[in-house]
Structure formats: structure tokens, C-alpha cells
Image (cartoon, grey):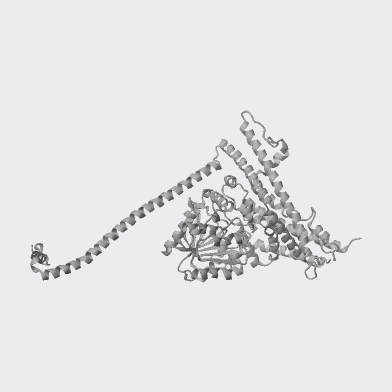
Amino acid sequence: MQTPLRIDPAKVLADIATFQRKLAAGMGYLRDMREPEYANTPRELVYSEDKLKVWHFTGHGKATAKVPLLIVYALVNTVWMTDLQADRSMVRNLLEQGEDVYLIDWGYPDGADRWLTLDDYINGYLDRCVDVVRERHDLDAINLLGICQGGAFSLCYTALHPDKVKNLVTMVTPVDFHTSDNMLSHWCRSMDVDLFVDTMGNIPAGLMNYVYLTLKPLRLNQQKYIGMVDILDNPAELENFLRMERWIFDSPDQAGEAFRQFIKDFYQGNKLVKGTLEIGGRPVDLGMITQPVLNIFAEQDHLVPPDASRALGKHVGTTDYTQLAFKGGHIGIYVSGRAQREVPPAIHQWLRQRA
Amino acid sequence: MADPASDFIRDYQTLAQQSWDAWARQFQQQPAVNPFAPPAAPAVGNDTLERTLAGLKGYFDWMQAAAAGGAAQQPASDWRQQLQQMFGGASQPFAQAFGGIDSAGAEGFVRQWQSWLQTVRHSGFGDLPGAHGPTPAFGLNREQQMQQQAMATALLESMQATTRYQELIQRTNAQGMQRLQEKLAQHAEPGRQIDSLKGLYDLWVDASEEAYAEIALSDEFREVYGEMVNTQMRVRQLQQRQTEQLCQQMGVPTRSEVSSLGERLQALRREFRASRAGASAGHADEIMALRRELAALKRQLADGQAAAPAARKTASAKSAAVPKKAPAKAARKLNAAPGTSPRKRK
């Protein structure tokens, strides 16, 4: 039998030398490099409440879409993933397509926000944000784009306030939390969430990040940084890498009560698909969603497995349901080159057909 | 007799090590310019930096060891043995690749307890009251004794749970090696052979992650993971309770008190919004009722206006037809004509 290893000694030494050289070069680049900025597409503040802000993107031209689009992001991480850098900005691409884009920045909860519930977030904050946009455009209903946990919020909101939503787009949104490949859900099923929240209060962002890293510990804790050494002598790529690092680790704490309810009702109870979910004492029935729905998910998503998103089609009440599978991961769906080419145009076309 | 090749590798390794150490010092000593750790980075952020550096160092050490060891021997007499030398054994840099992840997490959970724990260990953990199960407590310090026992029990349970978790993680390491061998066996044909350390490393990562995912999705892992988190929370909760008692004695507000205030405040905010929304809804109802009334009045008025000309027309037609019936009205009209009013005349 042949050996599968055919490693040339000279190549090994060359690899080590290259590794060393890049580390040495990287020392200089990293020392001089400033914190990378996000894309910061021009925007105006149209509403704020507590730590929440609603931004309206002004863009360079006038929007052609008659109905504005409000982006509802997750409470985990920040919404700036959608406007990460100039050439990787979903927001910018949506503007270029002609959409009139708003987004909610939930802010960074602290001790004062410890008791915010899902009712406060969905029937409170989110509802008031929707009202602000509706009033600005003198419309009864606007378009919603919910991302990840924000997608689950948008589904709940649409089911509870159907008159205020014209079209609903969900991206990498978990719906069925009990698919066999959902590692996060699997892990937290045996957790005593009451003990956890009663003890921790708000859930620290660092702890959340740690859990995410342990989903793929070698890739995310080691292999990724070994890959970084390859780009240490390339300032542009290094800046992109560090910008992504900034986004990953610059994340908000989770308001304790909302976290407790989300884990218990969604992750543990899977109540969204069982039809037993209640928000603020009102039942959430996905069957009440009769608006057109576009559900976009990522085929290589390790945080929200595709099946967890696909399940939406079986539960919404609408007859106008469209599903779009993207070849990429949970983050790549916003920032990869393919995403820039495929996702915003697909959203725009779908909305335009339902204007 | 000196072997020039060995000397070269040894010298190279020394140089490389010095270079690495300089790189690591650069970032450990200057956190202000470290992109991984902002100046006010929380403790967990520093963990990330440490893990990053440890990860790079582990890879670097492994490459060096592979260069000095069996990786470069051609052809390999027994590639499985060669693999074992590179990835197996306690000395290889990745032995704790997965094992480290739990320690970082555990540190995050009970970081502030480490010094306390060390003190306890130095004094002999087995001597702690409650370490061998609860015992009756008496007298004035009964409550404190009970709390100490509860803490000892919780710590013991937490350590046991963490040990079970570590055992599972070690199983991942072993199964990862097994999978790596299986994957490598598929690369035996000429043209598919692994020809670089990086290629071998990437394959090892694939194999290890697959093994980890399989274990992490098992029922056993779920139960152990939950137990580890729950027992750590129990330790933390007891620690908070003791700290709060100390604060109360010193007259310092506690987190529970602040949290209770926050809860009440949030409830009040909700109530306020609900009543305002209710009042708005009440006003809206009233406004809607008034609008309906106004609309009805307008309709009546409009109907009246529409009816009036018709009535006038009818009246005119009637008066033309029956003039004798309107002398008084005609006289009033005459009196009311411009310039003919009695007041004007006055």
C-alpha cells in the first residue's frame, strides 16, 4: 500500500519559514492598523427609544419602491453585519436596487433592561418602530425583513399585527428549533434556564460568543487564525478580517427575561411550530400570516440549520410562499461576493412583483 | 560527530522560537494596539486573545516538531506510526485542542471563584464541611454552616460535571484521530497524497470537527453539558448569596435589590404604556364617535340643502300655479329686500 503522506522536507522548512516571515510582517501591519470601520452608508435617525434606534438610509438616489422595507435584526450581535463594508453591504445593494431601507439597531442592553420581555420587544419596541415608518410614509402596512432571531420576531409580529405588514421576508430564520442537526438547541435542552437567568441576570455577550465558538471549536478558535497568518502581509485582506472580528466580538449582552423566554419557548418548547406560543398573553399562530412570504436560508448554516428554516413553509397561512436556498453560511449570506450578486436583487425582484 | 542537518534544524528552531516569542510578547504587552483586545476588553475578550495565540503557537510548535521528527522522512515506512508521532502522545501541541475549550468556558463561569477554590484546595478540599455529604448544623452559626456545606456540595458537583465533560472531549480527540486515519487512507493513490503539513493539518481539523459534532449531538453530551452549566450556575448563585449577605452587613445595596427595583420599574413602564394606549384608544373611540356624528350631521345638512332647492322649486312652481296662497310670504320677502329693511330705513 502506498503512503498517503508524501511530505517533502524542503517544503516543510519552506512552510515554516513562510509562516515566520508572515508573522514578522504581520507584527508591523497589526501595530499600525486602526480599528476597521463599517460601511457607514449615509443614514438619518428617525426614531429612538431607550437604547433602540431606527435608522433610515438616505442612499444616493431616490428610492423607487413605494413601500419601505424595515430590517429587524436579532438581539444577538449587531445589525451592522448588513452594512459591513462598502463592497459587502446588503443595505447598500438594496438601496441601489431602489428599496427604501430602514433598520432597527437594538443597542446594548444593560442592567436597566434586565426585565425586558419578548412582549416588550415585539409588541412594544418593534410595533412602535413599525408605526413610525408607517406614519412617515402614510401607509397602513410596510415590508419587513427579519434576520435570524429577528426573523422569528418578525413572524410573531406579523401573526399578531397582520394589518401592519404588507410583505414579509425572513433570512436565516429558525422556525423549527428541534431539527436533529441543531446543536445549539440540543445543548440548551437540558439547561435549567430559570437558574441560569436568575443567576446571571443579563447574559454576557462574551459568554454567548464563547458558546458560538464551541460549535466548531477547532475551526473557529485555531484554524481561522492560522488562515489569518496567510493574509498578514496583505493589509486590505487583513482589514477585512479584522472588521469581521470586530463585528463578531462587539456584541450586546442579552436582556435576561427576553433570553429566558426565547430559550424556554423557542429552543426548548419549540412552541412556534407547535402553535402554543404566546407573546404578551396573545397566541401566536403562524397560520395567521397570509401576507406574501419570502424565506431565504443558507445551505451551510451551522447556527440555523436549513431544515430549521425550511419548516416555515409548512406552517404559514399564506398561499404566496417563496423559498430561496443560498449556497453559503450564516454570515456569508450577507457578506460574500455571491451574496452581493444574488440576495439583494432577489429580495427586490420579489418585493417589486408584490408592490 | 555533529550532524550538519540536525544542527541546522536545531538552530532554525531556536531562531524561530525567538521570533515567535517576540511576536507573542508584542501583543500580550501592548493590549492597547491589539486588534483582538480593545483597551476596555472584558475578561472573556482576553480569553479569546489567549486562545488565538495559543492556537497559533500550537500550530507553530507542531510544524517544528514535525520537521524535526518523522514528517519529512521519505518514504514513510509506516504512515500510521508517523501519524501517531505527529498527533498522538501527550507532548504533541494539539493534545488539548478540544480539552482547552471547556477550561476557558469554565473559567468564564467561575473565574472569580478560582482564588477561593485554590485556597480551599490548599487547605484540603476533603476537609470542607459538606464535602462528604450534608451534616447537621447547630447553634448561632447554623445558617453559615449550612451555606458552607451547600457551597462545598455545589463545588464538588460542578467539578464532577466538568470532569465528565472533559472525558467526552477527550473521546473526541481519540475519535478524531481514528477518522483522520480513515480519511488519509483515501489519499494513498499517487496524485492524491498529502504533500504539506498544512494539508495534513486541515484534514485533521476536518476529522476532529466531524468527531466532535457527532459527540456534541449525542444525548449523552446534552445531558453532561446541561449538568455542567447547571452545577456551575448553582455555585455562582450560592456565591452571590454569600456576597449579598456581606453587602447587607456593610450597608451596601445588593444586586437583588437593584434588580427588584428594575423589575418594578419595568412593570410600571408597561402599565403606563398600557394605560396611555388605553386612554388613546378611549380618546380615539370618542373622536370616532364624534366624527360619525359630524358625518351624520353633514349628511343631514347636505340632504337638507339638496332638499331645499327642490322644495323651493316646488314652492315656486306651486306659487306660480297657486298665487293666492303666498301673499304674506311675498310681503315678507319685499320687506327683507336690500335697502328696504326697516332698520336701514331708520
Residue A72 at x, y percent in the picture: 52, 60
Q: Residue at x 73, y 63 (%)?
A: B202
- Quick one: quadrant of the N terminus of chain A? bottom right
Residue A263 location in percent, x, y? 57, 51
Q: Give the mark count.
A: 0
Q: Position of residue B43 (x, y in %)?
A: 64, 51
- Left or right: residue B2 versus residue B236 is right
Residue placed most toward the observer, B85 or A284: A284
Residue A19 occupies which quadrant of the picture?
Answer: bottom right
Q: Looking at the rendering, which quadrant does residue B113 occupy? A: top right
Of residue B39 and residue A141, the one placed in the foreground of this image is: A141
Is residue B303 visible to the viewer in this orientation of the structure?
Answer: yes
Q: Residue furthest right?
A: B1
Residue B12, visible in the rendered structure: no
Name the spot of residue A282 as percent of width and height, x first.
47, 52
Q: Quadrant of residue A224?
A: bottom right
Q: Is residue A42 above or below residue B44?
A: below
Please state which of residues A227 and B139 is positioned toward the viewer in this rendering.
B139
Left or right: where B126 falls relative to B301: right
Foreground residue among B57 and B261: B261
Residue lying at the far top of the rendered structure = B139
* Residue at image point 54% right, 55% down: A272
